[in-house]
Image (spheres, rainbow, N blue to C red):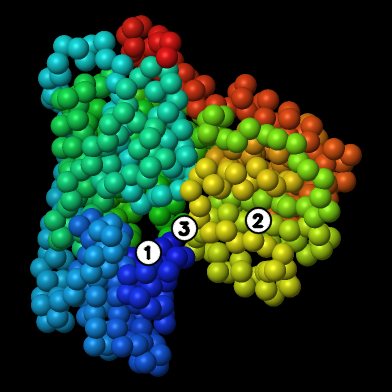
């Protein structure tokens, strides 16, 4: 079984078994097969594999369309299948090696033409698209997030769905434009969804060529939506190689808000595996990102570190506003008294990312009594490494690895924990620029928090008042913080009460939406909130 992404590995075996009627012998990311084709073929022979399947979440929109099919055709196996999970597990045979090799060559030329056009393109839109007269008093916003379909759960989905829900509660109509079907959490936050047309196969030869080509398809979809529901402004989540929001705001002649969590060029350079042409795409990405920040009326940066990244990229400092993440209190279970129990459950949620500190949490368990257990919610590339660490330390059986869960289910699981931890640590260059969404959800859940004393985390939380703060990257100190909370007469209940009060007063998405609207040059009729 090959999966299109390393993040799809968890659960891929069960999905394949439900479609094929048998458990796969091997589950691996197609990208790993591409990087070492001889080792991939040798492993299949060694395991005696008789069939290979490629699991796709959406055949019509997947990246690396032809190269990954070629990996299936190169397999020393009799049966070669493509499984489309978006079509109720529909299956189709993969083409032959000769035809796919020829198609790869043709698609590489097509992808190259998209990249060449982007390199030669000018970004000086002067014209504006006429909008109906009702746009002058419009209370509609046009939101663009190209990658919405790639994120089913997690902080990114919570951020975008949270802020768009905040605008809606202030009386705004929200139209979301994406390049694929968004998750339900995001769809329920908006009034209308416009999904851009699928890209030609050649454009999807690589992830980068697909992202470049998506700018035009996103632009067309956004302008189509704007004709039906004229927007007062455009809102876009910054993404690598994405400029559709800037193009549309310039063409419509309306303000633009750029949601800025970090420089995606920096993230691409420092966090992801690099393909042979990565330097070229980072050069293009830097130009695109500079164009976006300079086109934005408001750059809504989640932290001081992120704001500095925006100005370093060329944003006018007057347009940059620090707006940390937040929470929708109505989406979080209301706190309830914890029943007395001998064991203690410590909760964490995240994507097993490079600075989430889950490995610190795992290691801290060896310093805690045997009746303390962990619940780790989420999946990601570093989960397997964390599981190996837990086994090596002898604490694996004291950890519940829930995997990714729908947000309501994940929050219910966290609300049953005695303590919630946010053990972030930072080893990257420059200041820590994160604003963990989990932090604000923890606060709203009203459970005691033990967190790293790391930049914004240490600014939002007050040690001994709304949380217990510990040294970043120090497992023993994290364990000390957890033990300190559990030793309190109320097991930290008052810490949770104060943290929830702070979240509801200062850190809601409605509050963030109001702050953004206050910075936009909109007519008074647009900025005044309507009762609803």
Give how far across and how far down residue 317 sits, in percent: 44, 27
What residue appears at the point 73 percent right and 28 percent down from the top-left corner? 498
Residue 5: give its label.
Answer: 1
Label for residue 374? none
69 vs 379, left or right, is: left
The tag on residue 375 is 2
Compute the Cα span from label 1 to label 2.
25 Å
Percent coordinates x, y for residue 79 in the rendering: 24, 83
The answer to whether 146 appears left or right of 94 in the picture is: right
Query: Is tag 2's residue or tag 3's residue first in the polypeptide sequence?
Result: 3
Q: Quadrant of residue 11?
A: bottom left
Residues 118 and 176: in front is 176
Residue lying at 41% horizontally and 78% vertically, measured from the top left:
23
- Who comes first in sequence, dot 1 or dot 2? 1
Q: Residues within 10 Å of mark 1 (few under 14, many from 20)?
A: some
Q: Nearer the viewer, mark 1 or mark 2?
A: 2
Identify the mark nearer the N-term, 3 or 1: 1
Instruction: Give the quarter of the figure containing the N terminus.
Output: bottom left
């Amino acid at each position: 079984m090959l999966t299109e992404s390393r993040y799809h590995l968890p659960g891929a075996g069960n999905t394949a078994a439900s479609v094929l009627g048998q458990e796969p012998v091997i589950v691996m990311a197609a990208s790993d097969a591409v990087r070492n084709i001889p080792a991939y073929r040798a492993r299949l022979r060694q395991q005696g594999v008789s069939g290979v399947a490629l699991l796709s979440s959406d055949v019509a929109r997947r990246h690396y369309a032809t190269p990954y099919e070629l990996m299936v055709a190169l397999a020393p196996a009799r049966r070669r299948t493509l499984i489309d999970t978006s079509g109720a597990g529909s299956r189709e045979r993969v083409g032959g090696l000769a035809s796919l090799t020829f198609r790869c060559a043709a698609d590489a030329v097509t992808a190259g033409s998209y990249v060449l056009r982007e390199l030669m393109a000018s970004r000086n839109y002067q014209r504006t698209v006429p909008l109906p007269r009702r746009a002058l008093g419009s209370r509609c916003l046009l939101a663009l997030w190209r990658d919405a379909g790639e994120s089913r759960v997690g902080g990114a989905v919570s951020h975008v769905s949270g802020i768009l829900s905040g605008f809606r509660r202030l009386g705004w109509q929200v139209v979301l434009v994406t390049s694929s079907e968004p998750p339900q959490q995001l769809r329920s936050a908006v009034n209308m969804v416009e999904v851009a047309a699928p890209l030609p196969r050649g454009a999807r030869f690589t992830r980068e060529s697909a992202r470049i080509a998506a700018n035009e398809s996103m632009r067309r979809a956004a302008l189509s939506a704007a004709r039906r529901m004229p927007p007062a402004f455009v809102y876009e989540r910054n993404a690598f190689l994405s400029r559709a929001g800037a193009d549309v705001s310039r063409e419509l002649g309306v303000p633009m808000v750029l949601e800025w969590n970090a420089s995606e060029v920096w993230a691409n350079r420092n966090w992801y595996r690099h393909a042979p042409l990565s330097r070229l795409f980072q050069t293009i990405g830097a130009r695109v990102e500079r164009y976006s920040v300079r086109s934005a009326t408001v750059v809504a940066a989640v932290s001081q570190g992120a704001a500095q990244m925006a100005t370093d990229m060329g944003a006018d400092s007057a347009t940059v506003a620090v707006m940390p993440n937040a929470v929708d209190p109505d989406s979080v279970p209301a706190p309830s008294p914890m029943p007395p129990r001998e064991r203690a459950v410590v909760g964490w949620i995240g994507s097993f990312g490079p600075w989430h500190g889950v490995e610190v949490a795992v290691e801290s368990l060896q310093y805690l009594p045997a009746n303390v257990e962990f619940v780790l919610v989420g999946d990601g590339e570093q989960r397997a490494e964390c599981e190996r660490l837990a086994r090596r330390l002898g604490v694996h059986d004291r950890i519940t690895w829930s995997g990714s869960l729908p947000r309501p289910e994940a929050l219910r699981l966290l609300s049953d924990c005695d303590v919630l931890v946010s053990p972030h640590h930072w080893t990257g260059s420059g200041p820590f620029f994160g604003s963990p969404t989990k932090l604000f959800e923890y606060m709203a859940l009203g459970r005691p928090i033990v967190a790293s004393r790391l930049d914004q985390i240490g600014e939002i939380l007050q040690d001994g008042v709304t949380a217990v703060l510990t040294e970043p990257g120090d497992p023993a100190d994290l364990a000390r913080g957890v033990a300190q909370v559990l030793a309190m007469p109320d097991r930290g209940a008052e810490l949770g009460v104060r943290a929830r009060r702070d979240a509801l007063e200062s850190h809601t998405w409605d509050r963030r939406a109001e702050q953004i609207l206050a910075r936009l040059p909109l007519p008074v009729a647009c900025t005044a909130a309507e009762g609803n």
